[in-house]
Amino acid sequence: MIPKDRKPSLLMDTFSFHSFLNSGFFYCWDLADQYDITVLVEQEYEASSALLKLRAAGKITRIEAMPSWNNRLALFGWLGQRLPRLVAELQPSVVLMNNWHSFHQKILSRLVRKLCPQTPIVVCLSVHHPVTDFETTGLHLIHARKKAWRKRWPWLPGPMSDQLHDIWGWWVGVRDFALLPMLFTGGPVHQTYCPWNGRVPDKNVGDLYDAIVCYSPVERQNYAMEAPDLDQIHLIRHPMSDTATRALFGTEEKGNRIVALPSSCLDYENGQSHEQQVDHLVTVWGNALEIIQKKSHQPEIWWKLHPSFVDDPVMLDVTRKLADRLPGFQSMTGKITAEQMIVQSSIVVGDVSSVLLWSMRLGQRLTISLDLFDMPGGDEMSYYPGIKVIRSWDELPDLDDAVLVDHGRQDTAYPTIGEFLSGFRREGPAA
């Protein structure tokens, strides 16, 4: 029984932390009046400015740091010993997770079902869910991983390197979902997604969650690609607010610059050589940014590579050549977050990326998605009002007609997360 003078407890799992900045920060800000919030975070992120600002504002009660994923033995020891004590101590009324695929999230779900069987577990969609085939989206990043893998042993033939990559991925699945859970947490957990080969093995999610919340009908429909029950997927209003955004970014203000955020434009399957890939991307990005810069009269271009491509030799060469070609070009990779860049910009340009949705919800910026790379699903952002998708070169000269919009975050057709949780109850204890 919760004392009358104490708010109910909410446990939020922030993995992975970049997605926490996308939405989790705003969940904490929005729910602080209803719940005492404990944030579960990977070590090294517990002193992040975002969490410290939430704590200083009284929006979170507690920060619990778990060992880094790079130290698997320490992490599983923590999951087997500290996490059960934490759940038993908190007796959370609600658990929020940004997904259910990682081994630690499955272990958390199992603990909550055992220790707090009436507690609902809600997956809060932190980024967009792909409109494109989930396997296509996953495989795109697999090629980036395999290319980086080949750099470790450049003397190995490519097919052999790829085979070693796949074997290692199989071993990681056995280690993280079977062997280490059996040794430390009481039993194996079921693997429902394999990031090493970019596929969803099955939809057997068991009793891992009670509800998924997302922000648009197309997201709800496409979650059915990996969630078996559409009735469990609910629409809410995205919790981003002006007050929370100002608290997160302080005095940083909109500036006269273009932010370019390449993400999914590199195609490893088109058979092109390194030089051909570089030339193609420099041509597309260079021409597009030149036109946008000329029409908008923005003196600066801030460029940031997606985390999956920061070491990719193609994208590094593209960055160097664009720096030589474009006036006011600055590479911001590793220097600043994409969200900070967006706050300080007036135009945001990308291909297919969740940060474009972040820009759309922030509002008062022209948000552009370039579908000029002949990539599967390159028009995915067209499902989101407030993002201008450029499908042909003829459309770029018409940017004068693009309207700055402030879309989505105040859509009163959907409940807030607080309203949703107040009316949501778990059907009953796990079988």
Image (cartoon, rainbow, N blue to C red):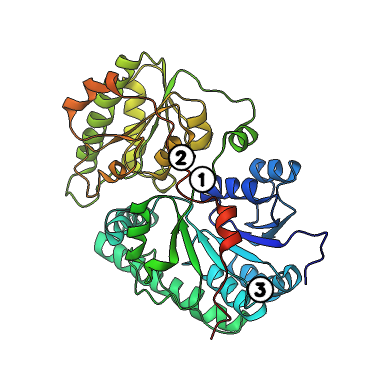
Q: Which residue is mark 1?
A: 22
Residue displayed at 63% across by 65% down: 94
**Residue 384 drawn at (x, y percent):** 34, 42
Q: Is residue 39 left or right of residue 342?
A: right
The residue tagged with tag 1: helix, strand or loop? helix
**Can residue 197 be seen here?**
no
As drawn, is 76 to the left or to the right of 195?
right
Residue type, numbered disc 1:
Asn
Q: Which residue is mark 2?
A: 358
Mark toward the viewer: 3 or 1:
1
Closest to the observer, 147 or 421: 421
* Neighbour tally class for label 3: few under 14, some 14-19, many 20 plus, Cα within 10 Å: some
| Circles 3, 2 touching at the beta carbon (< 8 Å) | no
What's the distance in space between the residues labelled 3 and 1, CA to CA?
29 Å
What mark, if any, has residue 414 been given in the picture?
Answer: none
- Whether tag 3 and tag 1 are in contact, CB under 8 A, the answer is no
Q: Residue 160, percent across and down? A: 28, 66
The mark total stands at 3
Q: Do the numbered discs 2 and 1 sit on residues whose CB atoms are within 8 Å?
A: yes
Residue 231, quarter of the rendered image? bottom left
- Vertical side of 64 occupied by 387: above or below: above
Q: Quadrant of the N terminus?
A: bottom right
